[in-house]
Every structure is written in C-alpha cells, then in structure tokens.
C-alpha cells in the first residue's frame, strides 16, 4: 500500500468508529495529516477532553496518553505504539520523590507535565514548558522543588529570581545532548537564521538563542515572524513540519542529535492497526491515581 492508501483507510475507519486521533507535533508528517488535533502534550489532552468521541488514539509517548486519560477518564485511550515511552518521564519514580519530599518538607513540588501519572499523585502542581514561569511565579511559597528537568528548571529559576528553586538532575537526554559547538556550526552554515530553542536544552545553548519557548511557542514564533530563516533547537520534526506550513521560509535543524526515537517509533501502520482494533495499548489508570494525579493538573489550571 502507498502512504495515501493507508491514510485513506485510517480516515474511513476513524469516521465509521467515531475515533479521535491526536498527534504530537513531533510526529511524522503522514501521521499529523490524518490527526484530528496536533500540538503539544497538554494541548492534545485538552482537545481530547472536548471531543465527543469515546475512543482516543494518542500518537506520542506514554505520559501523554496518561494525561489524556487523567482529563478524560470516561474515554477509551489508546497509545498507538506500546513501547513509546519517555526517558525523562521515567527517570524519577514515586518512591524517590517521596524520599526527597521528606528531606524538603517546606518546598512546593512542581512537576513538569513530562512525568508519569503515578509521580503526579504526590506533586503539588503540574506545569508545561509554556506555563512553568507564570505558574511558579504565582505560587505563594518561595521554596520550589522542580522536577524532573533541571534545564527547564534552571530557565524557570532565572526568570523568577525571587524564588528558591531546587533542581534535581533529570531531563530530556535528546535536548541535553546539544551543545554550544553545535550552535556555532549551525550559525556558520546559516548566518542569517534566527536560533529558536526549547528550554529543555542546556543553559549554555539557551543563552545563545534569539527565542526560547515551548514547542508550540517555537512554531508560533516562526510562523508569525517576518524573518525568513530559522535554526530550530528542538526535535527535528518541528523544522520539517514548519517547512510544510511556511514554504516561503527556510528551517534548519540545530543538530542531528535532536531526534527522539520514542516519538519516531510510532508509524502510520501503528495508527491503522489501532483504528482496526488490533494494535496499540489501552491506558488503564485506577480511580485513586486519576483522582490524586488530577489534583496537580487542576492546580496548574488554577494558577495559570
């Protein structure tokens, strides 16, 4: 079958079965084209909660599918590829953070949305990369324990200097692999291009940027800017997807290192198998996990 034939089968089956397909912005173009919604993890969860469809397929990684389930517990939520995990989300577990909380009982625990549902159950508030600065600034407590990403946490701490932000050594191994030498080489190749980076990159790379923001923030900035060339400092698929959206502009990946294998493990055939009913994995969370993990997400909504 051709890609178009697979896409047509998916579109036909999802309409017949009333299935909503979510595709994270890091997904391949052929998957984004058949999705009902594309965007970052939280945007997709909100979109899923508003759709009337009773079945939702998440083309992304496990914590994203879990977040969809937290916001829509009544829906059947499928992860398109069962092995699509997130190294950052899996770095810290409930036992570890419970022990850390015992050492710092006076700290408000702020969890990046890139964490497991289980870990969210013992955190005070959740944040996204786009809302982290605002939410931390709005927390009354000056003592903040930020997890798991120390690079995003360092960026937040810089933006809210009146807070005492304690960081743990975790983060995205893909974004953290990029260094200033990669920046130098990219700027030498594309001297007229603006550098747009995700705050999961190391602080030294963030300091070199012309713009720092979330995946959706980077895309909006590039699409709305009058500038014509951009070096994209996040997953390589964003540069590709921006090129489709803005063919009159030029987009360059900062480094070949910025390729997430967990995102790219999802394929169009995986999605086809899901809509056929013989693929993917249903996300099952018990009532206590949904209740407790949802509390920190509700707090995020309140503070943002």
Image: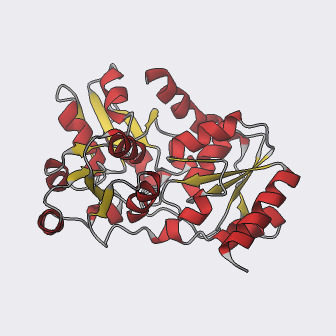
Question: Residue 14 versus residue 45: which sits nearer the camera?
Answer: 14
Considering every residue shown, the one lying at the far front of the view is 248
Determine the image quadrant of residue 211: top left
- Residue 166 is situated, as x and y percent measured from the top left of the image, at 25, 41
Q: Residue at x 69, y 33 (%)?
A: 50
Question: Residue 304 versus residue 90: which sits nearer the camera?
Answer: 304
Q: Is residue 116 above or below residue 173?
A: above
Considering every residue shown, the one lying at the far bottom of the view is 1
Quarter of the figure with the C terminus: top left
Q: What is the number of callouts on the image?
A: 0
Q: Residue at x 14, y 48 (%)?
A: 207
- Residue 111 is situated, as x and y percent measured from the top left of the image, at 42, 41
Q: How is the image coloured?
A: secondary structure
198 left or right of 267? left
Residue 98: tell me if it is visible.
Answer: yes
Q: Is residue 33 above or below residue 294?
A: below
234 left or right of 10? left
128 left or right of 68? left
Quarter of the figure with the N terminus: bottom right
- Residue 291 is situated, as x and y percent measured from the top left of the image, at 65, 35
Question: Residue 26 versus residue 75: which sits nearer the camera?
Answer: 26
Q: Residue at x 81, y 70 (%)?
A: 278
Residue 170: tell me if it is visible.
Answer: no
- Residue 154 is situated, as x and y percent measured from the top left of the image, at 22, 44
């Amino acid at each position: 079958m051709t890609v178009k034939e697979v896409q047509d089968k998916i579109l036909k089956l999802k309409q017949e079965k009333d299935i909503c397909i979510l595709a994270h912005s890091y997904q391949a173009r052929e998957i984004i084209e058949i999705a009902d919604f594309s965007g970052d993890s939280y945007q997709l969860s909100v979109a899923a909660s508003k759709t009337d469809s009773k079945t939702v397929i998440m083309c992304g990684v496990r914590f994203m599918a879990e977040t969809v389930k937290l916001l829509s517990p009544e829906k059947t939520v499928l992860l398109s590829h069962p092995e699509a995990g997130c190294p950052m989300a899996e770095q810290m577990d409930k036992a570890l953070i419970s022990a850390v909380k015992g050492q710092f009982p006076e700290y408000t625990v702020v969890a990046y949305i890139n964490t497991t549902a289980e870990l969210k159950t013992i955190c005070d508030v959740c944040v996204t990369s786009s809302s982290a600065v605002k939410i931390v600034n709005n927390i009354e407590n000056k003592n903040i324990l930020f997890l798991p990403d120390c690079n995003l946490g360092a960026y937040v701490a810089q933006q809210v200097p009146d807070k005492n932000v304690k960081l743990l050594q975790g983060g995205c191994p893909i974004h953290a692999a990029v260094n200033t030498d990669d920046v130098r080489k990219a700027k030498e190749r594309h001297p007229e291009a603006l550098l747009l980076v995700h705050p999961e990159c190391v602080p030294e790379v963030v300091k070199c940027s012309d713009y720092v923001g979330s995946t959706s923030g980077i895309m909006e900035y590039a699409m709305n800017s009058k500038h014509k060339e951009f070096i994209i400092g996040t997953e390589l698929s964003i540069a590709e997807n921006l090129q489709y959206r803005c063919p009159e502009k030029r987009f360059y990946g900062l480094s070949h290192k910025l390729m997430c294998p967990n995102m790219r493990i999802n394929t169009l055939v995986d999605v086809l198998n899901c809509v056929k009913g013989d693929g993917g994995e249903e996300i099952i969370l018990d009532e206590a996990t949904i209740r407790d993990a949802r509390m920190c997400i509700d707090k995020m909504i309140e503070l943002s």
